[in-house]
Amino acid sequence: MNKKNPIGIFDSGIGGLTVANAVSKQLPNEEIIYFGDTAHLPYGDKSAEAVQHYSIHITDFLLARYCKLILIACNTASAAAYEVVKDHVAGRIPVLNVIDPVVDRVAEDRAIKKMGIIGTKGTIKSQVYEHKLKAKRPDLEVVSLATALLASMIEAGFYNNSVSQAVINSYLAYPDFSDIQGMILACTHYPLIEKEVASFFNQRIKIFDSTNIVAEKVKATLEENDLLNDLRRNPHHFYVSDFTDSFEQTTKIFFQEKIHLEHEAIWPE
């Protein structure tokens, strides 16, 4: 595998651009090929079988572009399809998800005795965080809540205002969250509302979002496999399975700069 080959990142839509942005900042020499499955979003409402089907097709798209590592930048797909994608890739290149690095980081923090989790319906229903955390920290109490409105609210640009704070507060007022010491933001959209979450808890809890934690894991994995690119990268490429002007306009929210989306229909008619 060539060090100059790109990193492949995919998500159910464009929310995973928060992770791609963190990877780009952590690894400025690396080229990224991003695929957002906007034709099928949100994954949170889909069956595990459907998410696995989509993920395999996207993985093949990224493999065909000689990606040296694949990162599933979607909590729902990480929960439902990570093992399937790993089996499909069959050791040819490393495959990472956005759940395990966060679980590992949380498990190291012994000061936290009770952890809250917010995410999409699919992620919360899977209980993947609970199972993985309990395997590493049997003493840790974990409480979770599906926050269905937040991703669509953020994607529509409604955050950092009084309306978004009211919606966020209504979720975070969940009684089981009253005595947590930490919160996992189990959706790649949610780093954009981290300040509002922290404000609700009066800055007294530790908040874990996947972006920087996962970017550090990508760097470590490339180092372990001697795949770090030490030369200036090629331009990034961003693909979506369904294109609208609104998707392209919204990318700046997640990647912090305007980017061009290319439409790539990878499913047969």
Image (cartoon, rainbow, N blue to C red):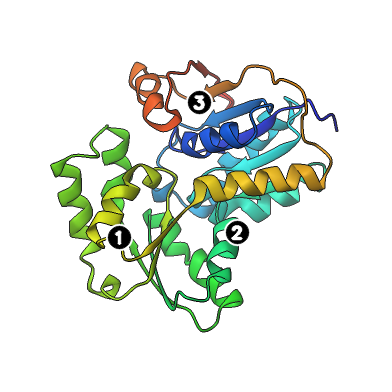
On screen, 28 above or below 151?
above
SS type, badge 3:
loop
The amino acid on which the numbered mark 2 sits, given as a three-letter code, is Asp
Q: Is residue 57 left or right of residue 226?
A: left
Across and down, in percent, residue 207 comes to 40, 58
The one of 142 and 43 positioned closer to us in this rendering: 142
Between discs 3 and 1, the one toward the N terminus: 1
Quadrant where the image shows the C terminus: top right
Looking at the image, can residue 12 be seen? no
Between discs 1 and 2, the one toward the N terminus: 2
Mark in the foreground, 1 or 2: 1
The one of 22 and 156 positioned closer to us in this rendering: 22
Across and down, in percent, residue 74 comes to 51, 45
Find out whether the residues at labels 1 and 2 contact each other: C-beta distance under 8 Å: no
Residue 264 lies in quadrant: top right
Q: Which residue is mark 2?
A: 100
The one of 242 and 166 positioned closer to us in this rendering: 166
Cα–Cα gap, marks 3 and 2: 27 Å
Find out whether the residues at labels 3 and 2 contact each other: C-beta distance under 8 Å: no
Across and down, in percent, residue 214 comes to 58, 48
The one of 86 and 255 positioned closer to us in this rendering: 255
Mark in the foreground, 3 or 1: 1
Report crowding for label 1: few under 14, some 14 to 19, many 20 or more residues within 10 A (C-alpha).
few
On screen, 240 above or below 179?
above
Q: Which residue is mark 1?
A: 203
The amino acid on which the numbered mark 1 sits, given as a three-letter code, is Gln
Q: In percent of the image, x 47 and y 67: which residue is there?
A: 127
Cα–Cα gap, marks 3 and 1: 39 Å
Residue 103 lies in quadrant: bottom right
Cα–Cα gap, marks 1 and 2: 25 Å
Q: Which residue is mark 3?
A: 241
Q: In percent of the image, x 77 and y 35: which residue is there?
A: 228
